[in-house]
Image (cartoon, coloured by chain):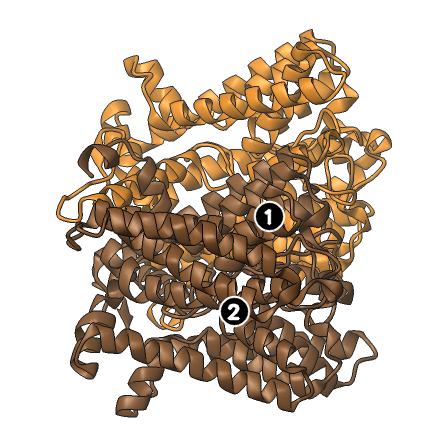
Chain colours: A orange, B brown
Amino acid sequence: MSFVAFVNGIVLMFLAGLMGVDAVLFPETRPVFTTAFVLTGIVGAMLAVAASAASPALNRLHTFVLTTSIWLVAALAGALPLYLWSLPPVDALFEAMSGITTTGSTVMTGLDSTPRGILLWRALLQAVGGVGFIVTGIALLPILKVGGMQLFRTESSDKGEKELGNATQFAFATLVVYIGLMGLCGLIYAEGGMSIFDATTHAMTTLSTGGYSNYDASFGHFDSAFLQWTGTVFMLLGALPFAWYIRAINRNIFRSEQVLGLLKGLAVAILGLSLWLTLNSETEFLDALRLVAFNVVSVVTTTGFASADYTEWGPFAVTSFFLLTAVGGCTGSTAGGAKTMRWIILYRSLRSQIRSVHSPSGIFSTKYEGQTVGDDVASGVIAFFTLYFATFAVLAMALGLVGLDFLSAVSGALTALANVGPGVGDTIGPAGNFATIGDDAKLIFVAGMYLGRLEMMTVFILFTRTFWREV
Amino acid sequence: MSFVAFVNGIVLMFLAGLMGVDAVLFPETRPVFTTAFVLTGIVGAMLAVAASAASPALNRLHTFVLTTSIWLVAALAGALPLYLWSLPPVDALFEAMSGITTTGSTVMTGLDSTPRGILLWRALLQAVGGVGFIVTGIALLPILKVGGMQLFRTESSDKGEKELGNATQFAFATLVVYIGLMGLCGLIYAEGGMSIFDATTHAMTTLSTGGYSNYDASFGHFDSAFLQWTGTVFMLLGALPFAWYIRAINRNIFRSEQVLGLLKGLAVAILGLSLWLTLNSETEFLDALRLVAFNVVSVVTTTGFASADYTEWGPFAVTSFFLLTAVGGCTGSTAGGAKTMRWIILYRSLRSQIRSVHSPSGIFSTKYEGQTVGDDVASGVIAFFTLYFATFAVLAMALGLVGLDFLSAVSGALTALANVGPGVGDTIGPAGNFATIGDDAKLIFVAGMYLGRLEMMTVFILFTRTFWREV
């Protein structure tokens, strides 16, 4: 277990390093980030040094503790500069958890006049959270065997190793793709008219599917079709599996059921809603397509930028965007939600079931990417959906209990759990803000974002009777 | 297949008989019911006679056609007198489908001054629909093996036969219990101050968990704690498995995980909401308990009576009642929704899954009523939930598309699919009415109620590519 402490120490030192960079860059908030740098650095170094003799051998149960503790520690450290700057403790924790989990819900208003040091910190949290989740999805969740993620044991570790020599090289390749795409996105943003600072931070929050913007009007601040289309494309790129990029680059294999499934689903949703919007408003089809594509991609990839208040398009849009909130991107990407892989397996399990109701004597197996899906994977996927909806119901009830209206409670519970960002409704919708809700509700959202990012089971297992006896 | 036509003919003749009774009892609507009696009787007799030579041997695929066609034909016949009386065709179909599926959503206003012949017809539809669903749940769904209902093959047919000699006797015993409870309920209602007519019709709509009332204020019309507690008890009795009554009477075996699970769940929901209501309003605890117990039992048993507009209790109540709408009663009862059995199996599958994530080498089986649940049953249950939420999402989207607001769309989709009755929100909430919504939305509700009553799979299987080739 002391290796867990060691890794947490390293994570803290890394975050301290980023605070140092922020302190160097922006004089206005230098005292804040210097203090945070010193505090976080000292705690991190102490932890790392004290536990440096630890053996890096982790059993599965230790890996649960490692995964859950890293995300919590990172959120707390992320909150420190925000708290030192001016945010109340709960707000700072909310903002940092929303950042590190790449949710993108914000309690901060007046972003347009917020110091750049703070804005950069929010973007950095999302950039780090994004790559952190890719690593969690590729390396940790498959070992933990939660939510059917064991399906990716071969793809990520075994096959990945064969492809690239070893796991370190694979992780490095992922990082190169991530930072490469981020750089490209930033360049195009700058080319399209964003300032260098905006281009940098928005590239970070686009590729990480985080969705923090430097403006209260979110992406709607940039009144540019070019920028909106660029954002649409790069949000989508952030929600595709990073292992797939590497495979595609290395071996020219582009076929991927997850990628195809996500693209198909998006095409249907975007075309359908665009046609509906064209028929039910004064909007031209191409404008409708741009508006719808940006906002649908933003919600489905769990980014959470808004280029327009789509909840004003009418009740159909509200219901659609509410349901789209649950969808999510691909596994092994920065996106949250239920993930394309799970929808595909759920759909195919259902199809097998319909066939077996039709012909009870037949045997119908479920396939994914050409291979038969084992019972353990199918059960993991089913368990994910069960926990997803159960946790959603409990969060919605809890939010109702502390006084949120129905629309905010149900859409808030879902947007937190899927790490999307905005809900629907006046308060927390795309044009709203989480600032006005109470501290009790904010803490429920913090729990929801954390549970969603760790795919619930990883956290819930810590609360089973036998876990701590065996660790 | 001609046996299917024969049974449909018999069903029509039976409904014609009930129309005849209604015609005899109430002079005001006699012309309406006489016409309906003649038309339905002729069509029914023609069908039955033409197909009377049919062999009663049905294969499984024929049983699907039988089950789906009976419910559709019964709804159409049920709509006939309402249409002949004064309702527009879509309204008549809505009201009859809502009646026969024991949903209880109504498009009729001014119930207080509606002719008794019509009110009796609404109650009769629910009484018939209730017993029809018990038979469907005990005899047909287990054969169709949908939604895990094959679990009840032994309990209902094999064991039932041993217990009572043969299936006919079992069906007869069920009918005796159903009518016996209905009679008892009616007597106590009359004792508590209802008129004989009100007591009769409300007993029918209570035990069938239908929820049609003779008053616009629903059960709230009777301002009597005694009547409300009586209603609470008998709604609950209508949602318990009828096979369990018979087993309990015959062999003194009261243990049933479904019954226990439902009672436990209700106790938690009722106590929690009562405490909350006491703390957050001027209501005394015992009054709160009565109000909450009645309305929670009404929604969970999918009856749909309202004794108060609980959506005015605040946002927590709205969210709670929305979520309670999905729950449902026991299998083999008149209740709709997901059913206690399926929640138990879902919960236990999840628990097995958590254990296997914890110790991947262990084997954890799911048990129900002391027996290991087969993979086919577990898959059926999972398929049920998948279809339940998928159908819910599609219905909600469709309702949004035809212009319903978010609250009406999502709660309406759920209340129709679970055959509950009221939704939440101003339009279709407990104090509202489905009269004001458009015909397109009404038809979507009709589809939802029908799909919900037949547990979706039974209908969807008719739309698979191979079905009609093989029938």
For the residue marked with disc 2, what is the amino acid?
A: Thr
Quadrant hosting residue B317: bottom right
Picture residue at 39% right of the left edge, 22% below the top: A260
Picture residue at 55% right of the left edge, 32% below the top: A300
Hey, which residue is sitting farthest left in the picture?
A361
Quadrant hosting residue A427: top right
Q: Quick one: quadrant of the C terminus of chain B?
A: top left
Q: Chain of mark 1?
A: B
Dots 2 and 1 on the same chain: yes
Asked if the residue under mark 1 is in contact with the one under mark 2, i.e. CB atoms within 8 Å, the reply is no
Q: Is residue A53 visible?
A: no
Observer-nearest of B266 and B193: B193
Q: Chain of mark 2?
A: B
Mark seen at residue B209: 2
Q: Secondary structure at mark 1?
A: helix
Which tag is nearer the camera, tag 2 or tag 1?
Answer: 1
For the residue marked with disc 1, what is the amino acid?
A: Tyr
Residue under label 1, please give it: B83
Q: Is residue A237 left or right of residue B403?
A: left
Q: Is residue A159 visible?
A: yes
